Each structure stands twice: as C-alpha cells, then as structure tokens.
Image (cartoon, helix red, strand yellow):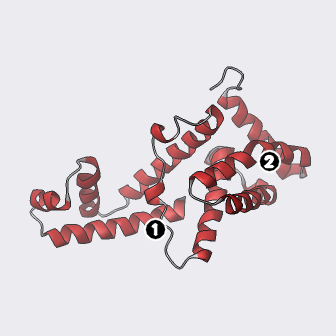
Amino acid sequence: MAASDPPLAAVTDEMAGLISRIAESRDREAFQALFVHYGPRVKGLLLRKGADPDVAEDLMQETMLAVWNKAALYHPARGSVATWIFTIARNLRIDRLRKESSQHFEDIDGMEIGQDSVSHLPASVAQDDQVIAREEGAYVVEALSELPPEQAQILQLAFVDDLSQREIAEQLSLPLGTVKSRMRLAYRKLKLALENRL
C-alpha cells in the first residue's frame, strides 16, 4: 500500500457508509463516489477474468446499476462492500456467458487464489483481489467439505499430494477407472457448488 493510501479499514467503513446513503436516500453523490471507486476495479476484474473490453464495460455498467437498485440488500455482516459488488459483477458475467454459450461456465480453472496472482498489481487493486481470493478460497474449502469422503480423498491425493491417477489407484487399491470416475464426479460437484457461490 502506498504511503498516501488510507488504511483499508477506513476505506471499508467509508464504502459501507456510501452504500447506506444510497439505500436510505438514493444519494446520487454517494453513488458517484462509489462508482468512481469501484467502476474501474470491477472492469479490471472482469478483464482479468477474460472478458473483452466492450463486455467488461457493459458488465461494469450493469453491476453499478444493480448496486444502485439493490443497495438496501447489502448487509455488512455478510462481507465487505467490495466482496458484495464483485460478487454481483461475477454473477452477471456468469449469466452473460450462459446466455452466449451452450457450454457450462467453467470458472474453476481460472480462479486466482493466492498471493502470486495479485502481487504485481497496484496496491488498491491488489487489496480488492486479496479480499476476493480469500472469499473464493473459503468457498472452495466449503465446497470440498461437502464432497463424499471417497471423492474428496482422491482430490486431496491428486492436488495436495500431487499423485497421478495411476498412483492414486495403486495407493488406494482401486481400479484406475474408479479413480477417474470419482475424480470426474468430484469435479462436476465442485463446479456446480462454486457456480452457486461465486
């Protein structure tokens, strides 16, 4: 964070105050301040997630319009203003992708979880991404905990212990086909769980 940047907690409180003013009195100045702060960040997030510039601009506008219309639905206990706004943007992007393609949305491969993905960004953008990454990480952990134990075990061996499917089959004394089948089922369940959360 640059020396001139205000502390993150102060920014968080200020943004929550702006949302409150919009919800209570449709305060246009509060919305303008929120738009100036989050508009570029939302567009940047969408661009990093693979949207082309025109789509990112459209979705950013839709996101901020949703913020204006749904400000009363924001609850600080459920997360920061940043998380709430970025979740709206992400959901709008998913809806757009579903309309444009008959293929299922596959965001799990592009998830940016971890410090490496944000370390090269400006401090304010990196902070936003860190908030999102922490929440996404929590969603992944929660989704993994909901898998049947035999499927979770295979994902653990594959991605934590870095074993191949053949090595997993040998370690668990299972047919290779069973390992592949359980992994496919686990991916499908994870994907559906994450689509509903993210």
Please tell me the numbered disc located at residue 192: 1
Q: What's the amino acid at mark 1?
A: Leu
Compared with residue 93, is residue 100 higher up or lower down, i.e. above or below? below
Tag 1 near tag 2, CB within 8 Å: no
Q: Where is residue 74 in the image (x, y as percent from the top left)?
A: 71, 52
Q: Where is residue 146 in the image (x, y as percent from the top left)?
A: 38, 60
**How many other residues sit within 10 Å of disc 1, few (<14), some (14-19) or many (≥20)?**
some
Q: Where is residue 93 in the image (x, y as percent from the top left)?
A: 62, 63
Q: Which residue is rendered at x = 68% and y = 63% of the image?
A: 55
The C terminus: image quadrant: bottom right
- Residue 178 relative to residue 42: left or right: left
Q: What's the amino acid at mark 2?
A: Phe
Q: Where is residue 120 in the image (x, y as percent from the top left)?
A: 54, 35
Compared with residue 81, is residue 88 higher up or lower down, i.e. above or below? below
Which residue is identified by label 2?
35
- Residue 118 relative to residue 12: left or right: left
Q: Which residue lies furthest to the front in this view?
A: 53
Q: Quadrant of residue 65?
A: bottom right
